[in-house]
Image: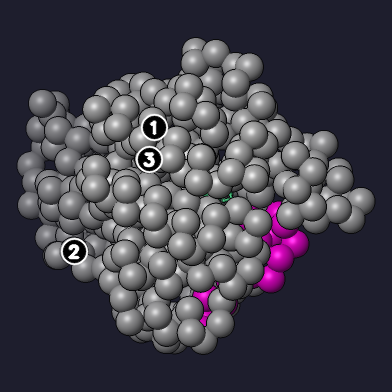
Amino acid sequence: MPATIITNIKQLVNIRQQNELLRGKELAVLPCIENAYLVIENGIIAEYGEMDNLGWTDNNNDNLIDASGQIVLPAWCDSHTHIVFATSREEEFIDKIRGISYAEIAAKGGGILNSAKKIAETSELDLLRSAWARLQEIMQLGTGAVEIKSGYGLSVEGELKMLRVIKKLKETSPIPIKATFLGAHTYPVEYKENHQGYIDLIINEMLPVIAEEKLADYIDVFCETGFFSPEETEIICIAGMNYGLKPKIHANQLNLSGGTQVGVKLEAVSVDHLETMDDDAINALANSTTIGTLLPTAAFFLRMPFQPARKLIDAGCAIALATDFNPGSSPSGNMNLAIAMSCIQMKMLPEEAINAATINGAYAMELQDELGSIMVGKKANLIFTKPVPSLAYLPYSFGSNLIDMVMIGGEII
Ligand code: NIG
Ligand code: FE
């Protein structure tokens, strides 16, 4: 197969000889090469370096791309989404404008329960079609790997339906997908007063089938006041862990829920959201191997204080960035926007944000051996920017589409 040779790259970003999860000060170090070349063979990064060192003789079969003026980055790794859903929820968006809170909407049977009703009424094929369209959209925005959660089923059939849709997406998607079982997203109405009944359903009816059909890689719980307590979160995660599903949990979004500490205790791959953190939660995370995944577009959309990224990084935490793409709290899967918000509102440096959205995002899906940096042997899932003055221009010029093209496995999409 002919190679693809990309020449005259203005800046090749996040080049690494080895994999390492970045924490604290390490996040600000983003190794780059100016005026670079990159060779792709069979969809894999085969070689890269400074243009001066490009030892290559013209072979008419090779595919040459001149990237003059363009920055090339590893594609974004979006490690937290809910892109399988039946319908949008802009009526709740209006309610929120009128002053009703996210928690109040949820308590009235809206929110997650609203999405669950719609999942029950929608066929697997229709769910697959709409999720496929969202997947195409985020790929065009530079996403080269994604995690997708269930959690709008809330019944045995509903959760399995969602997970089977995610499995079909996995089988057909050009980008790697990780599946997370989030049966514990909220209590269905009929179990509102019978928490143990729903936990039993998750543990005894859902998990065995999920394990049997290999429908999930991770287990998630929405650990939050009015949703699942830290004790319930721990029981459900341990049940999932017994089937080989590692935890990645929704923690500290609306309240000091204790979710971070439970995640740390269970050595979760990640604890996600973290809008509401105190010193105790920050220190617990900093002294752990668990990644803190920040979802700034969710904080933005719900008009919540942004995640305390500076405090988390300065305390030495390993931070990833993701979109939380879902119909209730983040109807956007635009990683470029998440990166811009983290720089503008959370005071992350552009280097920190890009590391958090690439290599650390890959770690948050355990895909670091395949993706997340420019490294020989990794997949050529790449972003080519339009001509821009510098890397910092990307988050600075928020809202502009600065992506010229995206490559997945060495193919332009
Ligand atoms: O990550 N917080 C919990 N779950 C989702 C939102 C779900 C919804 O509102 O549909 C989140 O923000
Ligand atoms: Fe979420």
Relative depth, front residue between 16 and 108: 108
Specify the quadrant that holds the N terminus.
top left
Residue at 51%, 86% in the rendered image: 279
Q: Is residue 166 left or right of residue 115?
A: left
Q: Which residue is mark 2?
A: 19
Residue at 32%, 46% in the rendered image: 240
| Helix, strand or loop for disc 2 | loop
Image disc number at residue 206? 1
Q: Are marks 3 and 1 in contact (CB under 8 Å)?
A: yes
Is residue 402 in sight in this rendering?
Answer: no
User: Given the image, on which type of amino acid does mark 2 rest?
Assistant: Asn
Q: Label 3 crowding class (10 Å Cα cut-off): few <14, some 14-19, many 20+?
A: some
Q: Is residue 232 left or right of residue 226?
A: left
Q: Are marks 3 and 2 in contact (CB under 8 Å)?
A: no
| Helix, strand or loop for disc 3 | helix
Q: Quadrant of residue 25?
A: bottom left
Q: Quadrant of residue 318?
A: bottom left
79 in relation to 253, above or below: above
Magenta stretch bounds: 298-311
Q: Is residue 216 left or right of residue 308?
A: left
Q: Which residue is mark 3?
A: 203
